[in-house]
Every structure is written in structure tokens, then in C-alpha cells.
């Protein structure tokens, strides 16, 4: 379970948020909303362990964690603004690399299935520079599905996705929650999930 | 006295303000005494004539250039280890003074070399090491200027200062090696004239003067840095009202 | 929507992914080499740069044999340093720009292992060609026989140190303006010992002193750099990502 206790953050000399406390239980998703510049990305980065908050602490599975803690790196899948794709490599090669980076081994059959589930099986051999923004995003979703992580931290995952893509995203998140995973999603678009599993937090 | 009281920029600011003039005036008095000893009282060296007198400035500034680098590395280690703002500010305040000391040491060394061996720059071990030390200082200062975010700058310059500090003995050793291989028996700058007691006293007084000067300047500079970096905080407005130090 | 979850579903069991250091090194090394091979033209340009710089010195001074033999080791070493510096800004820049560096910092593999893999790849693409070309270029400068062998071995041991130290500079200057020049300012003073001991091997041979001392010092430096540089560079990467 992820807990945030009295978190505070600044950007430069201005304070983004302070005394922020919440928890995300297994099987639940927390949607963080707020206008641009309210600190959604900063909050996600702090929870992922990319930086330290200016106050408060983060607790994962009951243990206080510092930035870059091993437990966070073992259990968190972070989907930030940047898709982490290499233009010179094919979609398939990129996916293999990113999944290997998470410490997972995946055989080629599961890889194909993952690409098919995000409708990219025909683009598997294309260099990533030939993919559209939406396709790059969907490749990121494939990585998410293959990474077997309990906690997903997603920053504006619906960006550049068409309606089919957004439906895919919702299916993925719901499936993840049903398996006992949790997710924290920063978004300014409403992403309706079954009410029993989701809550909202506004940063404005 | 609980020193931890002063580990916050807001409490250190007035303390620095009180200490700086004390160090400044002491430095001035010591410098006058030291220069009087060096240029007035100390006897003419039978080997090097009047020109040697510049070592009173050269040696003091050379010692200080190395000392300041070590102190800067120390504050950097504190800032990385304990994540405190004030240690980072102290390291930031010291770098320009350290660079200045190195620069003066190089110039005074050159002016010493000219009448003594006929050349301004002899590529000897100590001077070459001083030159590389100057580049190390410039590196820290340039990195600080290139980074906008103060916290990132503190930590990046901290890593650089520590890597530099580890390398300084290695660099010094390698330059010594290089120099002995190539220059062999020629006179080294290290062979200062045989020290009469009065000359040694003069050098120590100058060293103390330069040290106090560095402390005074660092304290004044850190006050400016504190005001600049803490400008959002409430206390800065109150502390800088006319009539307060 | 502030509905309470009806029941907390069972938590996903703690599954520990692979986080061994060697796997991390292999991942980064294999990937960087694959990327380098996909941009073969860039590699060729770097090697050409080295050859051109080395050829400039006689043109700028004198082709007289004895002078060249004196200059040679220094020129080869300084050119190796410059060639290394030329490619260092790119070491982390592209990963930083597309978000891979973030993912690497968040990976279960130790960041120092991943960074080490990148450093090895950098040496293989920048330092190794220098070592391979050294005998040829050394002959251009009239260095031969035992001196040439000594110089090549010194480059073999010393160029990895340049990659290791340079990576620290590359990590510290990530995303900053003034990029390449700032990197050079930070890294060059640190490389002075490598330069001195590396180029000094030829003098040692000429003076009949034997190269054991120089090479052991270089070797010791390499060991210290192998242990320390990945740690310093990964600390610098985390600072840049914060």
C-alpha cells in the first residue's frame, strides 16, 4: 500500500503543495486532478522516488522510503511524459529493452501478444521514429502490461490517445486493479472507472 | 554554546554580520605587520637579493589556495551528506576567494621567478599544480553559474569538489613525477631561501592575515548568498531593515 | 468521486525482479553498442577526427624527424583526450532527452551498474579505435619498436580512465547550456595524471628506465576509477534527474 504523509513540494521558490496526505490501497486507483502547474507531475515523481519532497514522507508497504529506494524500484512502474523510446530501434526492440530494464524476462510469444493487444503487431518491425504519438503511447502501455509491477504511477497517460486507445487504457488499469495492483494517475481528463475502485484528489 | 543554533541561514546571517568586521580589521592589521616585516625588517637574502621578498605574499596565498579547496570540499561533503542549505552556501561563497588566492599565488610566483631564474614561468611542479588547481576552481564556479536551480547546483558542485579533492594529491604527485623526470637538478621553487627566524615569523603573520581576510570575505559573501537564496522567507525582510546589521 | 472501496482486494504478492549488477551492466552495454552500430557514420567521424588532429601537428610545427619523435607521444595522447571529449556530451544526453535515463534510474538494476555498461560502451567506440590506430600513427611520428609497444599498452590502460572520468563530467553537465566546453573544463584537469603517466612511457623507454612504474601507476589509476567513477557518475545522474 502506498501512503503519502504530509507531503510538501516546491518548484524554485514557490510552494506547490503542502501537508498532502493520502493512501492508495491494493485494488484502488487514485486520480489526481488539477490545472497545469499545480504539481501533479512533481507529486508523481516524488512518489516514484525520482526526487525528495521538501517536507513529509512516502511510505510503501509500511516502510518509509527515500528517493531511489530499492523497494520502490522493484515495485513501481512509472509512466512519465517521455516515452523512453529510441528512434533507431524498432518498436519490438524497444519493448524488449524496456521490459528487460524492469528486470523481467519475457518470451517472444508473450511479446507478440502484448503488441497485438495494443494493436501494434503490424508496426513491430518499424523503427520507432516512424510511429505516431498515439502509437508510441500504446507501446508504453504494452510495456506497462508486461512489467508485472504492483504500483503504477501514470502521468497524463491519455495524452495523444484516440477513443480506442483510451478504452484500452481503461481496460488495462481495471485489469491491473482486479489483480490486486494499485494505480495513481495524474490527469486532467475524466477517466471513468467502476466507482468501487477509484477516488479522486484535486491539487488546485 | 549550542552551535547547531547557527546551522540555519536565518540565524547564521546576523552571526556572520557580527564576525566579518572583526576578521576584516584583524586581517588588515596583520597584513600591515607582515608586510612591514617582509619588506622592511627582514634582511636582504644573500642569494636572491631583494626580489625574494615577494614570497611573503606568494607562500601565504599558495597555502590558502589549497586550504580553501579542502574547506570547500568539507562543506560540500556536509551539504551532500546532511542536505543542509547553509553548507552548500558556504561552499558557494568560498570558491571565488580560493580562485583569487590561486591567481595571486601564480602571479607572485611568476614575479619571483623572473629575477631569480630569468623566466616568468618555469613549469616547475608547484606552479604547474597551482595552475591546475586554478582550473579546478574555475570548473566549480562555471558549473555553479551554469545551473539555475540552487539545490541542484549545491549538490552537483559538491560532487565535483569532492572528486577534485580526491584528485588533487594524485595530480600533485603526477606533476612532481613529470617535473623531476624532465628538469632534474634545476632549482625548484620549493627551495626558498634559508629561513632566518624573522623571515619565518613574517610568513606566518602574512599567512594569518590572508586567512582572516578569506574568512571575512567569505562571511560577507555568504550573507549576500543567503539573502539571494532565501528571499522568499519572512525573516529576510525584517533582518534587512535599516538600522539592523 | 469519493466512494470508499468496498473491500481491499488482496495485495499483489511481492515479486522481486532481477536486480543483479552484471545483468545491469550487460543490458546497458548491449544496448549502447547496438545503438552505436545503428549510427555507424558517427563512429567513423570520431575516428577520422582523431586521425586528422594527429596529422595537423607536423603541419603546424615541423616534419623534422627528431622533433616529431619528441612530440609524438604527447600529440597522440592529447588527441585521444580530445576525441574522447568530443563524444562525451552525447553519452547521457539522448537518454536524458527521451526519458530512458529516468527509467534507468528507476530500474531495479543498480544505477552504477547501468552507468558502467554505458562507460564500457563509450570506451569501445572511442578509446579502442585510438588504441588500434596508435601503432600506425606512432610510425608517422617516427616512434617505433619498444617505445611504440609501450605507448600502445599505455593507451590501452589509460583510455578507459578517460572514458570513466569523462562520464562523471557528462553526468554533471546534463542538460546545461555551455555543454561541451563546460564538460571539457571540468574533465581536463582530472585527466592530467593519465596524460603524464601515459605519455611518459615513451620517455621511460628512451631513458632505459623500463615502463613498469608508469604502467603500474596507470593500472592503479584504472582500478580506482573503475570503483569510484560509476558511483560518482550515478550520483550526478540522480542529481540531474531530481
Image (cartoon, rainbow, N blue to C red):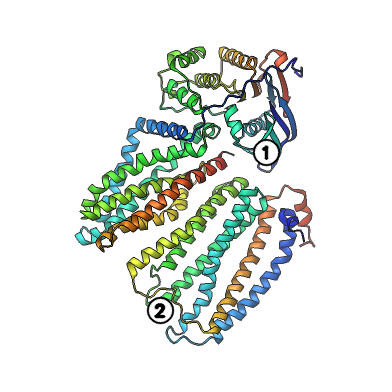
Left or right placement of residue B59 versus residue B94 in this view: left
Could you tell me if residue A38 is visible in this image?
no
Between B147 and C206, the one nearer to me in the picture: C206
Label ID, residue B116 = 2
Between C106 and C59, the one nearer to me in the picture: C106
Q: Residue at x 59, y 39 (%)?
A: C242
Instruction: Answer few, some or many: residues within 10 Å of disc 2's Cα (few below 14, many 20 plus, some between 14 and 19).
Output: some
Q: Residue at x 64, y 14 (%)?
A: A178
Task: Say which quadrant the N terminus of chain B sits in.
Answer: bottom right
User: What secondary structure is found at the residue carrying circle 1?
Assistant: loop
Residue A156 place in picture, x, y as percent = 61, 24
Residue B157, above or below B23: above
Residue A187 place in picture, x, y as percent = 65, 23
Residue C144, above or below C242: below
- Residue at mark 2: chain: B
Within the image, what quadrant is residue A183 found in? top right
Between C242 and C115, the one nearer to me in the picture: C115
Q: CA distance from mark 2 to mark 1?
A: 59 Å
Could you tell me if residue B14 is visible in this image?
yes
Q: Which residue is mark 1?
A: A53
Task: Say which quadrant the C terminus of chain B sits in.
Answer: bottom right
Q: Give the number of the mark in front: 2 or 1.
A: 1
Amino acid at each position: 500500500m502506498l501512503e503519502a504523509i504530509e507531503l510538501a513540494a516546491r518548484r524554485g521558490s514557490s510552494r506547490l503543495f503542502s501537508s498532502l496526505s493520502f493512501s492508495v490501497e491494493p485494488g484502488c486507483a487514485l486520480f489526481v486532478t488539477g490545472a497545469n502547474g499545480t504539481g501533479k507531475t512533481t507529486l508523481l515523481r516524488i512518489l516514484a522516488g525520482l526526487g525528495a519532497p521538501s517536507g513529509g514522507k512516502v511510505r510503501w508497504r509500511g516502510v518509509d522510503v527515500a528517493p531511489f529506494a530499492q523497494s520502490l524500484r522493484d515495485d513501481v512502474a512509472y509512466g512519465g511524459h517521455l516515452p523512453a523510446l529510441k528512434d533507431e530501434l524498432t518498436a519490438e526492440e524497444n519493448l524488449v529493452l524496456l521490459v528487460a530494464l524492469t528486470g523481467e524476462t519475457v518470451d517472444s510469444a508473450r511479446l507478440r501478444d502484448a503488441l497485438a493487444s495494443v494493436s501494434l503487431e503490424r508496426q513491430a518491425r518499424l523503427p520507432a521514429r516512424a510511429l505516431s504519438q498515439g502509437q508510441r503511447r500504446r507501446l508504453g502501455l504494452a510495456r506497462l502490461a508486461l512489467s508485472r509491477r504492483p504500483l503504477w504511477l501514470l502521468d497524463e497517460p491519455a495524452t495523444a490517445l484516440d477513443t480506442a486507445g483510451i478504452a484500452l487504457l481503461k481496460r488495462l488499469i481495471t485489469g491491473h486493479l482486479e489483480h490486486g495492483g494499485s494505480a495513481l494517475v495524474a490527469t486532467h481528463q475524466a477517466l471513468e472507472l467502476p466507482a468501487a475502485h477509484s477516488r479522486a484528489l484535486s491539487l488546485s | 554554546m549550542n552551535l547547531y543554533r547557527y546551522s540555519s541561514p536565518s540565524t547564521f546571517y546576523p552571526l556572520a554580520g557580527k564576525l566579518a568586521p572583526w576578521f576584516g580589521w584583524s586581517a588588515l592589521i596583520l597584513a600591515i605587520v607582515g608586510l612591514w616585516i617582509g619588506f622592511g625588517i627582514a634582511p636582504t637574502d644573500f642569494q636572491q637579493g631583494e626580489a625574494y621578498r615577494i614570497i611573503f605574499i606568494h607562500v601565504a596565498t599558495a597555502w590558502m589556495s589549497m586550504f580553501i579547496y579542502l574547506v570547500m570540499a568539507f562543506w560540500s561533503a556536509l551539504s551532500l551528506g546532511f542536505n543542509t542549505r547553509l553548507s552548500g552556501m558556504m561552499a558557494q561563497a568560498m570558491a571565488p576567494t580560493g580562485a583569487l588566492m590561486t591567481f595571486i599565488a601564480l602571479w607572485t610566483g611568476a614575479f619571483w621567478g623572473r629575477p631569480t631564474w630569468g623566466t616568468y614561468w618555469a613549469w616547475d611542479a608547484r606552479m604547474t599544480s597551482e595552475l591546475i588547481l586554478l582550473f579546478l576552481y574555475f570548473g566549480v564556479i562555471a558549473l555553479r553559474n551554469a545551473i539555475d536551480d540552487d539545490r541542484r547546483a549545491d549538490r552537483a558542485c559538491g560532487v565535483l569538489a569532492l572528486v577534485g579533492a580526491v584528485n588533487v594529491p594524485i595530480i600533485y604527485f603526477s606533476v612532481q613525477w613529470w617535473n623531476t623526470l624532465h628538469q632534474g637538478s634545476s632549482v625548484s621553487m620549493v627551495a626558498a631561501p634559508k629561513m632566518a627566524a624573522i623571515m619565518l615569523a613574517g610568513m606566518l603573520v602574512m599567512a594569518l592575515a590572508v586567512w582572516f581576510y578569506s574568512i571575512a570575505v567569505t562571511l560577507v559573501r555568504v550573507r549576500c548568498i543567503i539573502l539571494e537564496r532565501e528571499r522568499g522567507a519572512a525573516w529576510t525582510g525584517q533582518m534587512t531593515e535599516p538600522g539592523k546589521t | 468521486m469519493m466512494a470508499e472501496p468496498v473491500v481491499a482486494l488482496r495485495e499483489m504478492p511481492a515479486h522481486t525482479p532481477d536486480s543483479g549488477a552484471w545483468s545491469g551492466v550487460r543490458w546497458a552495454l548491449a544496448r549502447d553498442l547496438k545503438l552505436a552500430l545503428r549510427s555507424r557514420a558517427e563512429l567513423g567521424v570520431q575516428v577520422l577526427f582523431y586521425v586528422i588532429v594527429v596529422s595537423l601537428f607536423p603541419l603546424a610545427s615541423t616534419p623534422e624527424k627528431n622533433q616529431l619523435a619528441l612530440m609524438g607521444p604527447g600529440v597522440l595522447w592529447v588527441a585521444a583526450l580530445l576525441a574522447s571529449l568530443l563524444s562525451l556530451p552525447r553519452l547521457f544526453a539522448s537518454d536524458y532527452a527521451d526519458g530512458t535515463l529516468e527509467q534507468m534510474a528507476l530500474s531495479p538494476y543498480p544505477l552504477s551498474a547501468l552507468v558502467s555498461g554505458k562507460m564500457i560502451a563509450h570506451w569501445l567506440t572511442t578509446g579502442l579505435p585510438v588504441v588500434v590506430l596508435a601503432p600506425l600513427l606512432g610510425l608517422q611520428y617516427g616512434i617505433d619498436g619498444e617505445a611504440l609497444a609501450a605507448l600502445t599498452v599505455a593507451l590501452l590502460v589509460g583510455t578507459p580512465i578517460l572514458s570513466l572520468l569523462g562520464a562523471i563530467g557528462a553526468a554533471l553537465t546534463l542538460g546545461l547550456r555551455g555543454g561541451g566546453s563546460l564538460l571539457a573544463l571540468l574533465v581536463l584537469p582530472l585527466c592530467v595524471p593519465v596524460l603524464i603517466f601515459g605519455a611518459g612511457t615513451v620517455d621511460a623507454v628512451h631513458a632505459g628506465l623500463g615502463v613498469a612504474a608508469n604502467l603500474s601507476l596507470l593500472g592503479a589509476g584504472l582500478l580506482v576509477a573503475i570503483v569510484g567513477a560509476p558511483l560518482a557518475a550515478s550520483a550526478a545522474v540522480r542529481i540531474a534527474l531530481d
